Image (spheres, grey):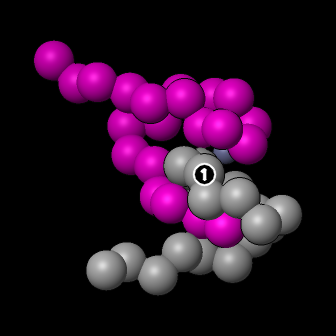
């Protein structure tokens, strides 16, 4: 069974989200929405 997470930006469910910095806030977004902001550096 696959779990999905809701993209903070577009509100759709995706199996995988990526952290991105959008408008100064670090949020989890889908791959499409990472284009709208600077992708967060993974540490
Ligand atoms: Zn999205």
The residue pinned by badge 1 equals 27
Left or right of residue 18: residue 42 = left
Left or right: where does residue 41 sit relative to residue 43? right
Q: Nearer the viewer, residue 7 or 15?
A: 7
Which quarter of the rendered picture does the N terminus lie within?
Answer: top left
Residue occupying the point 23% across, 24% down: 2
* Residue 20 sits above or below residue 27 on the image: below
Q: Quadrant of residue 3?
A: top left
Dot 1: what SS?
A: strand
What secondary structure do most residues of the magenta stretch adopt? loop
* Residue drawn at 50 percent across, 60 percent down: 19
Please tell me which residue lies in front, 27 or 34. Answer: 27
In this picture, residue 17 sits left or right of residue 26: left
Q: Quadrant of ligand 1?
A: top right
Q: Quadrant of the C terminus?
A: bottom left
- In this orientation, which residue lies closer to the viewer: 5 or 42? 42
Q: Residue at x 38, y 27 (%)?
A: 4
Image location (x, y in percent) of residue 15:
37, 37
Say whether residue 32 is visible.
Answer: no
**What stretch of residues is rendered in magenta?**
1-21
Q: Is residue 3 magenta?
A: yes
**With respect to residue 4, does 35 lie above or below?**
below
The quadrant where residue 34 appears = bottom right
Reply yes or no: does residue 27 show up in magenta: no
């Amino acid at each position: 069974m696959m779990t999905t997470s809701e993209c903070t930006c577009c509100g759709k469910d995706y199996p995988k989200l990526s952290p991105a910095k959008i408008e100064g806030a670090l949020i989890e977004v889908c791959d499409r929405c990472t284009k709208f902001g600077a992708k967060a550096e993974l540490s």
